[in-house]
Amino acid sequence: MRAALWLLALFGIAAAVALFAGSNQGTVTVFWPPWRVDLSLNLVLLLLLALFVVLHFALRGMAALFSLPAQARQWRMQQKERALYAALLDAVSQLLAGRFSRATKAAQSALAQERMLAGLDARLPLARQVRVLSHLLGAESAHALQDRPARDAHLQHALNESGDGDLSLETREGVQLRAARWALHDRDAQGALARLHELPHGAQRRTLALRLSLKAARLDGRTLEALETARLLAKHRAFSEAAAHSIVRGLAIDLLSEAHDPAQLRGAWSRLEPAEREMPEVALHAAQRQVLLRGDLSLARAWLLPVWDGMTAGSLSLDDSLRVKLIRVLEAGLDSVDTDWLLRIETAQRNDPRDPNLQYLAGMACLKRQLWGKAQQLLTQAGLGLKDAVLHRQAWQALARLAEERGDSEQAAAAWKRAAESDAFR
């Protein structure tokens, strides 16, 4: 459609020119003494048009001729700029390929090209950012080569260049994050944390910064800070659910292990979130620490109550090692156990009469309450089924003492022998 309209317009212009030129009888007389020249007006117009075209192309040719030196200089600058970017890309490629010496040379070549361009007064776009990235690539390569002086020199240059206000914020933050990562590799946790604290508040909450902060806090022994960071990472879904659960659980256990008296243990327990307190490993470790520190065993049993209820109700699956730990912790507090817990133990044993761990716990509870006959029955059944060497030995030792009190030396000797054979379970 557009081509048809252009064609119609050309026909219209041709018709208008033909009408004007065909009916134009005007003449132009040029007096050049002693001559007189008469020219047609149409011819004069054509000559003027031709003169304009010739002058136009002549001026353009002269302008192109005089601009050749500037164009040649611009071409040379363009080639140097391309060489600069080629060296920068080569440094990245060599670094990714693990050829760190070549990456260092390519980064130095990029810096040399940039200095050459600056010496020629060439205005390179983002020249400062190019210098920072070149130094950063050089520092990364030197770090991989364990050349710390060269790495620190490149890093200092990058920090100096990135300190100016005309550089993008992301570039400065990238330099600080890489510096924190290198400090971690050098086992300098405080240096890494100092680098991370220099970041803006928003950048400190990014996933990469939080990961580095977690590693630095764990390396520096700041368990509570590491636990808080791990919680943030779990909320940001920086780890898989299983990995986040494992990391938080391990840090919670480490926090409890740092307590050296019952008061500190209660303080550490209060800093845990409800979901963390319900983790069986965390609750068991807290109760074990309470027993070890000779604290309030009723408080330890209160911490274990969700785990016990989950295990007896079948909603919480515990492996054998955790079940054994639970039995040991509860056994340590049988002297001060109240009626409610005795009822829980008895009910759990009745609901699962073939569980040797519950048989052992119920038997020891009966032993503490001087219910000799029931204790002997439960401990005998437990001794035949227990797989844990310690519980197996303690069950037969208790049976041996019961037999000695009854004066049954034969059964006592047999029980002591079974207790001595408990090492076979290891």
Image: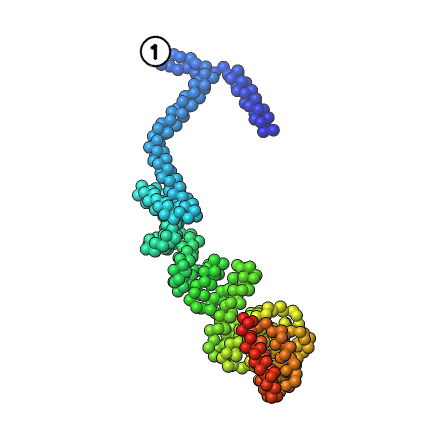
- Name the residue at 55% across, 75% down: 421
- Residue at the extreme left of the image, as rendered: 119
Badge 1: few (under 14), some or many (20 or more) residues near its Cα, within 10 Å? Answer: few
Disc 1 marks a residue whose amino acid type is Pro
Work out whether 120 lies above or below 31. below
Q: Position of residue 73 (x, y in %)?
A: 34, 35
Query: Is 216 situated above or below 264?
Result: above
Residue 143 position within the rendered picture, expressed as x and y whole percent measured from the top left: 38, 54
Q: Is residue 395 above or below residue 64?
A: below
Where is residue 21? Give x, y as percent.
51, 17
Q: How is the image coloured?
A: rainbow
Quarter of the image with the N terminus in it? top right
Which image quarter holds the C terminus? bottom right
* Left or right of 1 in this view: 247: left
Hey, which quadrant is residue 339 in on the image?
A: bottom right
At horizontal 63% and vertical 69% (from top left) the residue drawn is 316
Q: Which residue is mark 1?
A: 34
70 and 222: which one is in front? Answer: 222
Q: Quadrant of residue 178?
A: bottom left
**Of 66 and 323, which appears nearest the observer?**
323
**Which residue sits furthest front?**
410
For mark 1, give the secondary structure.
Answer: loop
Confirm whether residue 274 shows in the render. Answer: no
The answer to whether residue 349 is seen in the rendering is yes
